[in-house]
Amino acid sequence: MQIYYFYVHAASQQMYIQLQPIVNVEPEFTWVDCYRDDVIHRLEQWQQDVYDCTQLRLNELHVKDIQNIEHPCTFDTMDDYDLLIFRKLITPTDQIVSGENALEEHERLFGLTTTPVSFITTNNILITIRERGNRALENYLTRVQTIAAKPVDEQNKPRKMAASALDLQLRLLNSMVDDYLDLRAPLSKRVEFWQQELLQGNRRFTRWQQLFQENMAFQQVENLCEEQIDVLQELRGEIIENHGHAKSKKRVGKQDIILVRINDLVSHVERIQKYTARLNNAIQSAIDLHFSAISNQTNENMRILAIITAVFAPLTLLTGVYGMNFEFIPGLKNPIGFWIMLIVMLLSTAMLILYFYRRHLMGRGERSVIDMLAQQHKNQHVNLLWFLDYEPIKQTLKEVEKMTRLK
């Protein structure tokens, strides 16, 4: 348990930090940082220590919630304090012990692991309960200790410190939300990997189980962000209804600044949620393109088979006709009948191939899709008098029309 005392300078009215209480001077607010192993191993002693420092008696149900490592994000209010449980993402930079040596086993859902951080807040007290190795909070603690080691007049020069317990709580929450913002780069790489795997054409895609788990991981992040947004909205509503939580005993806190900080946190979480939803949609689009490519390949194979069938259909007809067992068949005893029939078969095959090629049904034509659709639209109208477009017949018809007019 670590205790930090925040005081207001009498002359400059600036905040400064002390590691030990000042005699006969009441602090603006006090930050009590606790570890989960103290709550788990020596619960009664921890409750007594908290009471000695803050004069707070915690509700038994709230103590059980703090002990539950899988408790979801929640916000609850009491007459004496507010309880907020926020789940922090465990990143590779965190030094939280896991595995057999861990104090408690974290549930790993589709590759993501989170840990609860509990905040107990009053108008002049902030109590945090966290695990050892929490990088976000320990970095802030290191900064607080560095500031406390400086002289009182120089502590507030680099950056303004928290003005109330609720202000400090929001700053800690902001540092934890930043870990979720760091998810964007690795998640984008994972999406690019699955897009390449789905859209490659040299082998069949078989990793559907891993892709399903990846998709569920995105949904897990979205659900977690939704819980966090609900908790922050409840906290915002409590501040609006009861402004006493946002101000200390001596100084009147600015409610607008606190609300701006909460709105900023909600905005960050919503950005993560929307970004994850876009990545999930990108994977769904890649899956749709994958099945579209498979369908296109199947249609291409069927097209080739249909062309082969159409080319060999006249040959099959001719061989079927001349394969009938009749005594008298034209050309049956002709010495060049075989060659005539072979030439007819070759000519019919060549004409069909030429026809399919001109219709862009064979090969890879360079015509655009619009031109092909226009051609198909044009060919929908069958011209039964096509022979009239023949040039000599056109000239003859024109001469006949002139003679008719002269008469």
Image (spheres, rainbow, N blue to C red):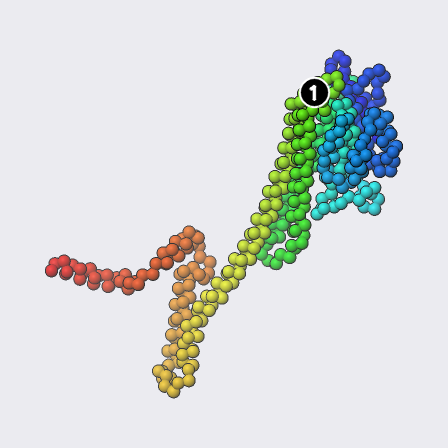
Q: Nearer the viewer, residue 161 or 396?
A: 161
In the rendering, at what x and y percent does residue 52 appear?
Answer: 86, 26
Q: To which residue does mark 1 refer? A: 253
Q: Residue at x 43, y 81 (%)?
A: 323
Q: Nearer the viewer, residue 242 or 271?
A: 242
Res 172 quadrant in image: top right
Q: Nearer the viewer, residue 344 or 397?
A: 397
In the rendering, at what x and y percent does residue 241 appear?
Answer: 67, 25
In this view, 389 is above or below 133? below
In the rendering, at what x and y percent does residue 147 appear?
Answer: 77, 23
In the rendering, at what x and y percent does residue 337 appear?
Answer: 37, 81
Q: Residue furthest front?
A: 79
Which amino acid, mark 1?
Gly
Q: Residue at x 66, y 32 (%)?
A: 233
Q: Residue furthest bottom?
A: 327
Q: Secondary structure at mark 1?
A: loop
Say left or right for 383 vs 205. Answer: left
In this view, 369 is above or below 13? below
Q: Residue at x 75, y 40 (%)?
A: 71
Quadrant of image for the N terminus? top right
Q: Residue at x 41, y 72 (%)?
A: 314
